[in-house]
Image: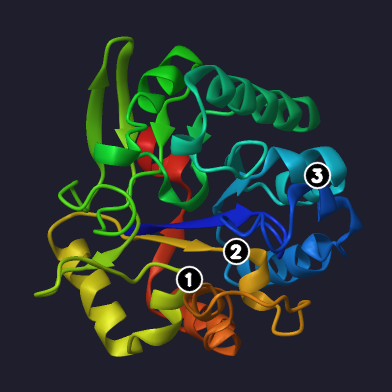
Amino acid sequence: MKNILTVDVEDWYHICDIEHILPRSAWGQCESRILFNLEKILTLFGRFKLKATFFVLGYVAERNPEAVEMIHSEGHEIASHGYGHLQVYKQTKDEFLKDLLRSKSLIESVTGEKVIGYRAPQWSICKGKRDSYWALDLLVRSGFLYDSSIAPLRFIGIPKAPNTPYTVSTSHGEIREFPPLVMPSLLGNLPAGGGWGLRIFSYRSIRRRIEELNRQGDPALLFLHPSDFDAHRPKIRLPRIKRFVCYGKIKTTEERITRLLNDFEFTTVREVLIG
């Protein structure tokens, strides 16, 4: 059983909801560490001779096209993470479409290959007060075959959404949805496939959850960020919860993911989707 390994290719300062601390206008003044950290990830994946899906931020593709070239030259799948790293529900439909197509064009101009997958910043395709479910229709209209933007979690995403890959019907056709790994609990689903969840929960519980999904014939989807491998990245003063999410036990990421790569097989979203 092959599971799915993904990377959100963004720099250390691409953090949602901190415009009052680090405005977007200041991004160009920040030290870029994307190439340094990507090299670590690509070297690690090369050791295990595996391919992964890299959701590249258009802002990164524009400023550091060599990052896209590095990933592409290693034979990994490249998908879109949008352009400006703004949650979908903070955009109008026109703004979202412009952001989406800008990132798609930038990536395709470097790789020469069609982009078929998308992931929204901070799992921000939602329903309810922060409704942005309409984005799926625009993805289909724009030629995307799959999405990985809906987290089955209470505080972000859609709590009651399926926690394994499923198909969504839109007015323009179907799209396949690939949610991140979560662990069911009495408090609802808990994030376990990346970020602070991957770093905080016991390795045994994460491994057991992946084994459970695999026994029922479903792949687990993990997600990483280049900054997860960078304990020495620049620090900025963040609110307590945001600081925990970004920096908590950051040094354990590489050890955790290495153990998982030893214990399970991984591949790209494209391979699971198309075969």
Q: Is residue 20 above or below residue 239?
A: above
Residue type at mark 3: give it.
Answer: Glu
Q: Residues within 10 Å of mark 2 (few under 14, many from 20)?
A: many
Q: Is residue 253 above or below residue 189?
A: below
Residue type at mark 2: give it.
Answer: His
Q: Looking at the rendered structure, which numbered label has been put on residue 69?
A: 3
Q: Residue at x 54, y 81 (%)?
A: 253
Counting residues from the N terminus, which is met first, the one under dot 1 or under dot 3?
Answer: 3
Q: Residues within 10 Å of mark 3 (few under 14, many from 20)?
A: some
Q: Nearer the viewer, mark 3 or mark 2?
A: 2
Q: Secondary structure at mark 3?
A: helix
Q: Secondary structure at mark 1?
A: helix
Residue 224 percent across, percent down from the top left = 54, 64
Label 2 near label 1: C-beta < 8 Å? yes
Q: Looking at the rendered structure, which numbered label has been put on residue 59?
A: none
Q: Disc 2 designates what residue?
A: 225
Q: CA distance from mark 1 to mark 2?
A: 8 Å
Q: Quadrant of the N terminus?
A: bottom left
Q: CA distance from mark 3 to mark 2?
A: 18 Å
